[in-house]
Amino acid sequence: MGEDSEMGLIEWVWDLYGKGNFLMAVDERLHSDYNEKQVECMIVVGLWCVHPDKRLRPSIRQAVHVLNFDAALLNLPTNMPVPTYQVPTIRQLW
């Protein structure tokens, strides 16, 4: 990601994930000294934890199970979902 980019970190990583280029998010200072399966797991769980719809975010227990490879890796959408908000009506406020 360029220094003058307007894209935020989450959007950037989700974009890389969607394009199948998630390894581009790995810090180059690691000099390729990492396990690609673990990196994919960390990125998917990280994106899951910051999902725009908070109802779809995992519990700590769910995230740990996936990180420990005790549960299947989630299939996230390739494009970051757009957050939606429900504005309460006047009736709901009273």
Image: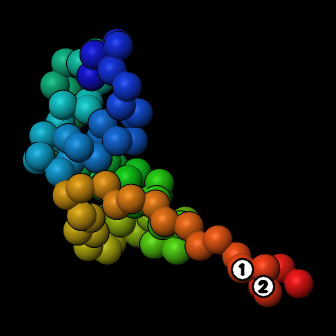
Inspect this view and state whether residue 6 appears. yes
Q: Residue, x 31% and y 55% (percent of image)?
A: 80
Q: Which residue is mark 2?
A: 92
Residue 60 x, y percent position in the rendering? 55, 65
Residue 33 x, y percent position in the rendering? 20, 27
Q: Considering only vertical position in the picture, is 3 above or below 62?
A: above
Indicate left or right for 71 with 21 as reference.
Answer: right
Farthest residue in the left direction? 20
Q: Amino acid at mark 1?
A: Thr
Q: Residue, x 31% and y 74% (percent of image)?
A: 71
| Quadrant in which the N terminus is drawn | top left
Q: Which residue is mark 1?
A: 89
Q: Quadrant of residue 81?
A: bottom left
Residue 29 x, y percent position in the rendering? 28, 15
Residue contact at pointers 2 and 1, CB within 8 angstroms = yes
Q: How many marks?
A: 2
Label 1 element class: loop
